[in-house]
Amino acid sequence: NIIFLDKEAPQYFYVVLTGKVKITLQREDGKEVILSWLREGDFFGEMALVSGAPRAATVIAEAPCELLEFRADDLLAIAREHPHLASSLRRFYRQRLLANAMAVSPLFRPFPRGDRKLIMERFRSREVAEGEVVIREGEPSDGLYVVLDGGVDVVKRREASEVTVGRLREGDLFGEMSCLRKAPASASVVVRRAGTLLRLPRKDFDELVRTYPQILELVSELCEERAENLGAILSGHAQWTEDGLVLV
């Protein structure tokens, strides 16, 4: 049975009393990724309550379960009165964001779990606000970024206007073209929804691709795909919509 679906509005926080539940996420290629299995004593549903965003994953009961259910308003009221609870929720929230990013990001997916952790430890987190410009067109990127939480738009100047050429969400990369080519950024990246980014500084990026040559191949493929998409948009053969890139 489905307990809640990805993108639903958060209403409850859950604790597993008995049984087992599966937390899944659907990648952009349509493949289902199992993020974790939860059993007696585990909890879930805190991510959307902490962030205020829609549910980031789907939760399914894999066997008959008994769950303890807390209303969102009640849990947040308790957290305000007990700061240690709020701190614990934020800590688990960050851990699950990291686990989700490693599961869905093309940068981390091909690697075993142990290598994923070592790669992730090289990144530094950065909180960003809505409207903030993370990378500015014509200036070099200060590193390779992964969207941990929130969303960003990729915007390209065209004559006197700006064109959205990409909309990135949790797990997506950006800044790779400037790092790989050691050239100014070909587009700006603007925060659409406040959240958290992971940044790998340029010097660490160079060191990382020497240690893990597979990353260079992955980033090169992503660069080629995005360059093709950008060309199609600027030539008028495609446009970016809420449903992604659409040919016109």
Image (cartoon, helix red, strand yellow):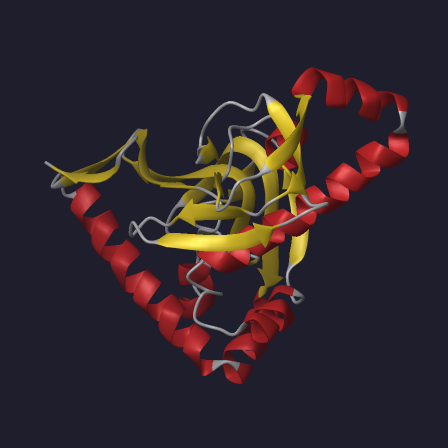
Q: Quadrant of the C terminus?
A: top left
Residue 178 picture location, percent across and down: 44, 61
Quarter-of-image position of residue 239:
top left
Q: Describe residue 151's horizontal placement relative to residue 240 as left or right.
A: right
Q: Give the vertical position of 236 relative to 69 (above or below).
A: below
Residue name at image x 42 percent, y 78 percent? 214
Residue name at image x 61 percent, y 53 percent? 98
Number of marks in the image? 0
The reply to whether residue 145 is in sight is: no
Question: As rendered, which of 127 and 231 lies closer to the eye?
Answer: 127
Quarter-of-image position of residue 14:
top right
Residue 225 picture location, percent across and down: 26, 59
Q: Give the vertical position of 169 relative to 163 (above or below).
A: below
Question: As rendered, which of 223 and 105 lies closer to the eye?
Answer: 105
Residue 6 picture location, percent across and down: 44, 35
The reply to whether residue 23 is in sight is: yes
Q: Give the vertical position of 21 relative to 31 (above or below).
A: above
Q: Describe residue 238's horizontal placement relative to residue 179 as left or right.
A: left
Q: Describe residue 109's horizontal placement relative to residue 99 as left or right.
A: left
Question: As rendered, which of 156 and 58 lies closer to the eye?
Answer: 58
Q: Describe residue 101's horizontal placement relative to residue 166 as left or right.
A: right
Residue 237 picture location, percent across and down: 11, 41
Q: Quadrant of the N terminus?
A: top left
Question: As rendered, which of 46 and 125 lies closer to the eye?
Answer: 46
